[in-house]
Image (cartoon, coloured by chain):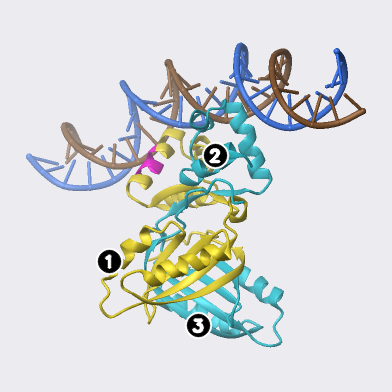
Chain colours: A cyan, B yellow, C blue, D brown
Amino acid sequence: MDAIDLSLVELLRGNARLSYAELARQVGLSAPAVHERVGKLESSGVIRAYRAEVEPESIGLGVTAIIGIVEDSAADTDDVLEAFRAIPEIESCYFMAGVESFLLKARVGTIAELEQLIVRLNRTRGVASTRTSIALSTKWENRPQPVTPPPA
Amino acid sequence: MDAIDLSLVELLRGNARLSYAELARQVGLSAPAVHERVGKLESSGVIRAYRAEVEPESIGLGVTAIIGIVEDSAADTDDVLEAFRAIPEIESCYFMAGVESFLLKARVGTIAELEQLIVRLNRTRGVASTRTSIALSTKWENRPQPVTPPPA
DNA sequence: GGCTCAGGTCGATCGCGTCCACGGACTGTA
DNA sequence: TACAGTCCGTGGACGCGATCGACCTGAGCC
């Protein structure tokens, strides 16, 4: 992970469809060298995936909700996690410090679907209570922040 | 936005670096036809960007926080939003229903930086109070959910 | 000094991206 | 029914990019 790797990561966070040739020009290496570096970044897990970012409304996901989960005292956290993983509407899942063990971001098409989702979450074994907040609009999401040189 | 467009969107949400030729094979069209469709999806705003998804720790962003913002009664929401937009650590920003007008997801390198960020947010004109929760771990994030056929 | 290895360049080949001309289906009109 | 226009696709052509293999160079180590 040197400065060139960081540049590559930053370029690909901005536009995942840049060609290797273009990346090579930007960082001042040859295309095969860039190809190899990017391959290593992928296989070492630094780059996890390349995703198109899509306007959620246009694929029928107009309702965004943030849901806090309180576990009951007998809950097995791994089981709860497993149950959440099986629910496709849950796009993100964070394990939190605080009373609410999990914070979920979910997207559904309608308020009715959100209601169903909340019922399902409340029925999940290990879940004591849920607290749902609705996002009226997403101002921005997953904006890549500029890569800081070296963290240390 | 027909069924083929939805397939293209779904394929690109799964892997933004698929070639047009490969997309063409998957949806049963020619490469130029796919090229044109994807171009239209981009210019119509359905596809907003292509991003590499990076392990945050490896670029020095090991601390994730979720921050709720309460505006004061004299706040100009647009100004507050503008101020947030200028803070690169804020990766996502949702305008919420409820007491907290905004919910922010921020990533920083260290707890010390998080402290500075919170101070900065509290000093922002229009912000009455903040409530920060720390994510101990990110179980998953921005998992693309399967595209439902047509929503209507 | 010489070996080894990591990581680069160069050159060649093959497939892909992209432009363009052409063609068929659908629609509205006379 | 015939016709024209539009939309959306295909196929061919061509130049560029992806990718492989051979080779080069510098650093570290016996």
The image quadrant where one finds the N terminus of chain A is top right
Secondary-structure class at tag 2: helix
Whole-number angstrom distance, CA of label 3 to CA of label 2: 40 Å
Give the labeled residue for mark 3.
A131
Q: Would you place residue B69 above or below residue C24 in this image?
A: below
What residue is shown at x 37% (from left), y 47% (from top)? Answer: B41
Q: Which residue is rendered at x = 37% and y = 46% of the image?
A: B42
Q: CA distance from mark 1 to mark 3?
A: 27 Å
Q: Secondary structure at mark 1?
A: helix
- For residue A102, side relative to residue A17 (left or right): right
Q: Looking at numbered disc 3 in the image, what kind of residue is underneath it?
A: Arg
Say which element carries label 3: strand
Cα separation between marks 2 and 1: 34 Å
Q: Please state the extent of the stretch shown in magenta in the rendering.
A: B36-40
Q: Is residue B145 visible?
A: no
The chain to which mark 1 is attached is B
Residue B22 as seen in the image, left or right of residue C17? right
Residue A136 location, x and y as percent?
36, 72
